[in-house]
Image (tube, helix red, strand yellow):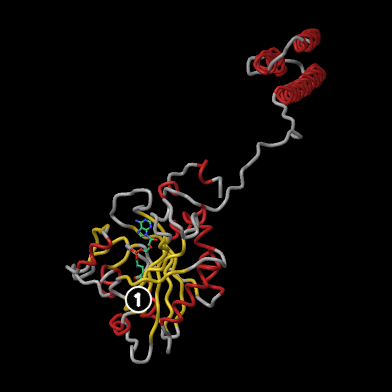
Amino acid sequence: MIDRLKVIKVEAIAELGGISDLTELERWRIHYMGKKGQLTQVLRQLGDLPPEDRRIIGALANEIKRQLEDELAGFKSRIARTTVESKLEKEWIDVTLPGYPVSPGRLHPTTQALREVCSIFTSMGFQWVEGPEVEWEYYNFEALNIFKGHPAYDMWDTLWVDFYNEKGEMPMLLRTHTSPVQIRIMEKTRPPVRVIMPGKVYRYEATDATHESMFYQVEGLAVDKDITFADLKGTLYEFARRLFGEERRVRFRCDYFPFVEPGVEVSIDCLACGGVGCRLCSNTGWIEILGAGMVHPDVLRRVDYDPEVYSGFAFGMGVERISMLRYGIDDIRLFYSNDLRFLNQF
Ligand code: FA5
């Protein structure tokens, strides 16, 4: 039995030398040390031996078993090491290579213009506030003196939302201008009020080179004792000069908005031709930038401001149109068509 054990040991170690993968190794283990393995069979027969032989042969068999187990463990760790090494060899990367350039992006031209416009007004003491884009009919129209059936409803072709107040009487809409924020602010505050209200507005209209169905406006409102039309003019002159340059001329002409009295349209002399007349200004020499006026007394009354004590002015401008003028952009649809060739220029 001793010879048999020695043969098993020599054969096992020799066989191990020719093994190259883990599957073969497992087969080897089962062959020698599995339940019916060569070595296991010898160990099973130990019980039949006289005690003296059992002690000697048992010690030898256990010693051989331990040696084979050590060989097995050593082999496994060698295979694992070479597998990792060859994997590293195959999959190496050069970590010193420069990465792909990542474009940090930039602000959209509308955002740039909006921030510039608002920073001019905040430097004059106006506070920046925002209101909801989905608005009640009351704030968008009635609170601003635009009543049902009034022809002024047509001035703001509206996108209605299928949602009503609890009584089912008042629908919601996508606000057609930023003027409803005037009412929300005045309802919550007492004069003096000086706010600018930027945001998105929506109109149900066919788009063309100067009309979008979604665009941005910046609204302004100042209410206090003794505010006059001269304050409105002074503020808007200052704004136009700071945004478009010291040499700009500003024109005020009568216009109609139901929530102001008097109402005006404000234009600057054409940046392209200097006022002589060209295609950009339709040969008039002037380009309209905003609507404005003195807050109508009925609007003040509706928010519980006494028009005998308080007066105010308001204005509203289209932000994309301001950018178009400054950069000579001839089609408003470029702003939201996501063409990087256009956007990268700003
Ligand atoms: C108004 O929306 C008034 N709420 C402005 C106002 C506020 C008047 C406070 C008096 C007091 P209007 O519809 O004219 O007015 O629009 C104001 C500006 O928005 C226009 O001068 C123009 O610059 C811009 N605008 C109007 N319609 C469009 C459109 N479809 N696409 C892009 N810009 C537009």
**Taking 226 as reference, is 238 left or right?**
right
Residue at the bottom extreme, as displayed: 309
Q: Nearer the viewer, residue 27 or 18?
A: 18
Tell me the residue that label 1 is attached to.
183
Task: Measuring from the top left, give residue 162's x and y in whole percent.
Answer: 23, 58
Tell me if I can see residue 150 in this picture: yes
Q: Residue at x 81, y 7 (%)?
A: 3
User: Any atom of ligand 1 within 8 Å of the CB at mark 1?
Assistant: no
Q: Nearer the viewer, residue 143 or 325?
A: 325
Q: Name above or below for residue 324 compared with residue 178.
A: above
Tell me if I can see residue 110 in this picture: no
- At label 1, the amino acid type is Ile
Q: Residue at x 40, y 78 (%)?
A: 313
Task: Measuring from the top left, give residue 183's x and y in whole percent.
Answer: 35, 76
Find numbered disc 1 in the image and state the secondary structure of the residue it sits on.
Answer: helix
Q: Name above or below for residue 290 compared with residue 28.
A: below
Q: Nearer the viewer, residue 337 or 29?
A: 337
Q: Nearer the viewer, residue 85 or 173?
A: 173
Please state the quadrant of the image where ligand 1 appears. bottom left
Q: Name above or below for residue 267 compared with residue 325.
A: below
Counting the numbered discs, the total is: 1
Task: Measuring from the top left, give residue 107's x and y in whole percent.
Answer: 55, 53
Q: Residue at x 23, y 65 (%)?
A: 153
Task: Measuring from the top left, give residue 237's x and y in whole percent.
Answer: 49, 72
